Image: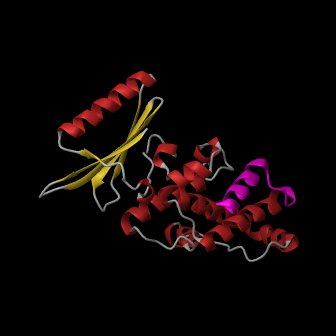
Amino acid sequence: MKKAFTYQDEKSNKFWTIDYFCMTICVHYGKNGTIGKYDMKEFESQEICEKEAQKLIASKIKKGYQENPTFDFDNCLYFDVGEFGPHPKTSHPRFVAHFTEEFYYDCGDEEAPFGSDEGSDTLYELEEVIRKKRIIDFATFPKHLIENIWGMHYISIDTLDEKAIRDMAKEHEMDMIQSDMITYATAFGQIKITGKLDTTLKKNALLALKRLAIMYSDGQLTETQQTMYNDLLTF
């Protein structure tokens, strides 16, 4: 259940939203026009969760907040709460609706977008940069992250020729793996945070998944990789 409330007087113009389901409550709050902050809490039962949600809503109404049934949830930026990691309640509604497999929120699956160290760090860095700049060039972010923030070497995807890729991997395998994982993690991260996907980044992410498959499984995507590829392709 999602509800949004706003408060406005001569000094304040604020929003507060609540998303509660099963045993988890997520609130998003701040000044209108800002990114705001997210908080989450888990409860022992659905009954306790719903009671706490109603208590929080009543408290806001008592303070003068009014429900806003036309609140634009699609126009928000979504950021995870540290101890919970990637979570549907802190992901853009378009991401939640389109990317339905549980591994999209898995912090331990190396193939999942945010399950590897590279993927997890990419999502974190994306959130940090967006908080500071709000608008960034997502297509160039993988290269920027690897070379300017981490001081490593980014290898772009210029070919899917199997021989050329395997020859290159003899000297640059780890750089290629890192470049590919960070490229597709950035694509999924952009959708998760903003609900949108840069067309150039989409193309590069699809190529990254294919290049990884050429290096490790004779060009055959694993089941997880194939799902990610299909989901990205149709977004």
* Quarter in which the C terminus is drawn: bottom right
- Percent x, y for residue 48? 38, 23
- Percent x, y for residue 36? 33, 54
Tell me if 138 is positioned left or right of 13 in this view.
Answer: right
Viewer-nearest residue: 231 or 177: 231
Residue 81 showing in the rendered view? yes
Above or below, comparing residue 44 to residue 200 in the picture? above
Viewer-nearest residue: 125 or 51: 51
- Percent x, y for residue 31? 26, 56
Residue 107 showing in the rendered view? no
Reply yes or no: does residue 232 show up in magenta. Answer: yes
Which span is picked out in magenta? 217-235
Kindly report the secondary structure that dominates the magenta region of the rendered protein: helix
Q: Quadrant of residue 205?
A: bottom right
Applied colour scheme: secondary structure
Q: Residue furthest front?
A: 69
- Residue at horizontal 48 percent and vertical 30 percent from the top: 22
- Percent x, y for residue 156? 68, 74
Reply yes or no: does residue 212 show up in magenta. Answer: no
Q: Residue furthest left?
A: 10
Above or below, comparing residue 94 to residue 17 in the picture? below
- Residue at horizontal 77 percent and vertical 63 percent from the top: 210
* Quarter in which the N terminus is drawn: top left
How many marks the image carries: the answer is 0
